[in-house]
Image (cartoon, helix red, strand yellow):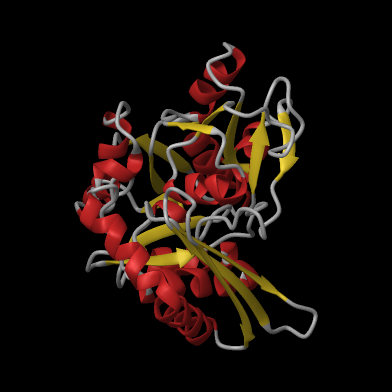
Amino acid sequence: MPHLRIGSRGSKLALWQSNHIAGRLRAQGHTVDIQIIQTTGDKITDVALAKVGTKGMFSKEIEEALAAGDVDLAVHSLKDLPTELPPGFEIAAIPKRENALDVLLSASFSSIEALPPGARVGTSSLRRQAQLMALRPDLDIHPLRGNVDTRLRKLEAGEYAAIILAAAGVNRLGLTQLVRQIIPADQMCPAAGQGALAIEVRQGDTATGQQLAFLDDPSARATTTCERALLSAMGGGCQVPIGALAEVGGDKNLYLRAVVAHPDGSKVLRESQSGSDPVNLGEVVGQALLRRGGSAILEAVYSSGISAK
């Protein structure tokens, strides 16, 4: 079996993800090594993500190494990848998905409802901020950047009453001790692709693609394709106040719920539909949200400089 080189960011979570994939490849008989590549998003840690506005900020440098032939594949958090990959790349596999929801972590409070008025809550996600403000406009939402460990340290130091993170990250790292609430999707719809990994390769590299095919999970592929189709239809990048969660029902149809919200929580639009075709369902729901006022919300976000596509 061929030797495979994985390109990865250097955070603990990124390395957990890459080591997880490496382990599965080694079980198939491959020898594997992981090459750490620093991305733009890793270098800019003192600015809210929504204000950075760099497309592919967590993937560009890794893709450059992939294009140069320095690595054979890249392991990403799918939600960090733009909905349209740069020319020359493709997603060879989307493994089985972790919990896609967001979680509230706190040393003292059991839920969003239990937070006292004026409590400081940490997140740099416009999507989380918007939905949280709609639920609790009396809270003090404060920017929070850094890897999972850094964010937890700030919480434990008392800088925040609570922070909101993706369930997948804290689960993968075994850092669930301060998780107080798994936030239901009807309160906080997650980011498109949240909880899923993407294995990226050079387009046309069929040999590597065939070696990775066993990692692809049909359910994860269908649900994330649907969510990303919605995001693409709405013209949104990964740092906009849009949420999407697709699930496979008992009838094998997809059920998609989505949200677009003004960052201050003053307007929240939700839409849900079911269908059998992932791309069509995502596009139909995305267009419905745009028609109902999503266009005006996103226009206001972009023109304000809060975010970038």
Instruction: Kindly tell me whether residue 36 is visible in this rendering.
Output: yes
Residue furthest to the right in view is 250
* Left or right of residue 288, residue 166 in this image: right
> Most extreme residue toward the top, as rendered?
157
In the displayed structure, 45 sits above or below 52; it is: above
Q: Position of residue 70 (x, y in %)?
A: 25, 46
The residue drawn where x is 22% and y is 49% is: 305
The number of numbered discs placed on residues in the rendered structure image is 0
Q: Quadrant of residue 182?
A: top right
Residue 206 is at least partly visible in this image = no
Q: Position of residue 216 (x, y in %)?
A: 57, 66
Towards the viewer: 270 or 181: 270
Q: Quadrant of the C terminus?
A: bottom left
Height in image: 235 above or below 74? below
Residue at figure coordinates x 53%, y 23% from the top left:
149
The picture quadrant where one finds residue 139 is top right
Q: Residue at x 24, y 51 (%)?
A: 304
Residue 87, percent from left and from top: 22, 68
Residue 62, horizontal then vertical, whole percent: 29, 46
Most foreground residue, 164 or 195: 164
